[in-house]
Amino acid sequence: MQITQNGSLLDLYQDHILKFSNVRNIKHIWSRCILIAVISIFMLGPGIAWAGSGDGPRSFPLLPKDINLLTVYALYQSGDQLLSPDQTIPDADIDAYIGILQYTRTFSLYDHLGAAFVAIPYADIKGSVPIGGSVGTVSTSDTGFGGIILGGIFGLVGSPALSGKEFAEYDPGLQIGLVGKAFLPTGSYDSDRIISVGSNRLAGQFVLPITYSFASSMVDPTMTTFEILPSVTIFEDNTDPSGGADTTGQKPLFTLEAHLTRNLNRTTWVSFGGIYNYGGETSADNVWQNDRRESLGLGASLSFAATSSTTIKLSYGETAWRNDDGLDGKLFRFVTTYGF
């Protein structure tokens, strides 16, 4: 169901949109305007919280049911962070080039909007890492696939499963959802390396996205949203860690992410937000290391429609404050989503 001038998704919606517009002789114009607005304002799909950077603004919007989204992420990050959503190496200087391919499918579940997604990351990381003693730092690198990410979303409040005219006319108001993600230990990993693209343990993340939209409908060109995304990430022990320990563990990492977004027109919006991380103290052979992470990051985003079926989102963020063991660095993120 490619969304083009002759695409079937456009054909699927155009009769409903025609009734909504109530102007038969401008059928094509209204169809494409409404679809472009829906795609560009909402069709970004579930976000991927990567390396403590958060999911980003409008990552869990209300979408039409029974659509497919293909999302490509390109990220550059520098600082003391690895790729899993929890690990930092204080005083490290690491550059990471990351690509992620994600597929999402929306559906109706008990008349609420649901979605399932799978993402496959690939990365090239390199940098210098302090190892103590007289050696100081050592250069290290790794290239390969990261762990596969599986996830699901269920709309709890204000998230009905809608299509066509119903979706276009819907007054969004308050929306609350529940998101679950599993970070599988399937990526490139070698305990003899100081850093690896993958991780040798399972991690799970739970997000409670809360959004309030100031808008008269889903295609309101002046829509403003305020979003809060509290989350917790829990970790399995690593039984083959890098270094001298036989087993390492980690306490839960708590995150609070918030964004204020504003539509500039039907196809473009901007945002400003922040993310606070707390927790994630590690252990080595059941001895806690007193290395609780705490950091505050700030960032901004710009999103616009490239075509009637494709959106682009550009984001930049960096650490504004941290403790000695907290996340430190900067991130540039490019996201493009294609709906079909």
Image: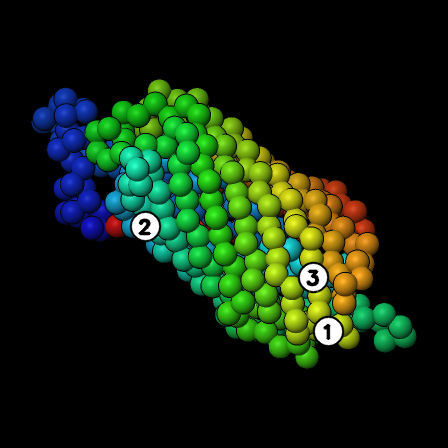
**Label number found at residue 75:** none
Mark 2 and mark 1 lie on one chain; the one further toward the N terminus is: 2
Q: Position of residue 77 (x, y in %)?
A: 61, 57
Q: Residue furthest left?
A: 25
Q: Secondary structure at mark 2?
A: strand
Q: Secondary structure at mark 1?
A: loop
Q: Disc 2 vs disc 1: Cβ atoms closer than 8 Å?
A: no
Please rate how many residues cluster around mark 3, counting C-alpha atoms within 10 Å: few if below 14, some from 14 to 19, many from 20.
many
Asked if 245 appears above or below 112 in the picture, the reply is: below
Please rate how many residues cluster around mark 2, counting C-alpha atoms within 10 Å: few if below 14, some from 14 to 19, many from 20.
some
Residue at which label 2 appears: 105
Asked if 92 appears above or below 279 in the picture, the reply is: below
Q: Quadrant of residue 263?
A: top left
From mark 2 to mark 3, how far is it between C-alphas?
A: 34 Å
Q: What's the residue type where badge 2 is placed?
A: Arg
Q: Residue furthest front?
A: 286
Q: Inspect this view and state whether residue 205 appears.
A: yes
Q: Position of residue 311 (x, y in %)?
A: 37, 45
Q: What's the residue type where badge 3 is placed?
A: Gly
Q: Position of residue 290 (x, y in %)?
A: 82, 54
From mark 2 to mark 1, how far is it between C-alphas?
A: 41 Å
**Label number found at residue 246:** 1
Residue at (36, 32) in percent of width and height: 159
Please rate how many residues cluster around mark 1, counting C-alpha atoms within 10 Å: few if below 14, some from 14 to 19, many from 20.
few
Residue at (73, 46) in percent of width and height: 294
Q: Quadrant of residue 109?
A: top left
**Label number found at residue 249:** 3
Give the foreground label among 2 and 3.
3
Residue at (51, 38) in percent of width and height: 208
Q: Inspect this view and state whether residue 74 appears.
A: no
Mark 2 and mark 3 lie on one chain; the one further toward the N terminus is: 2
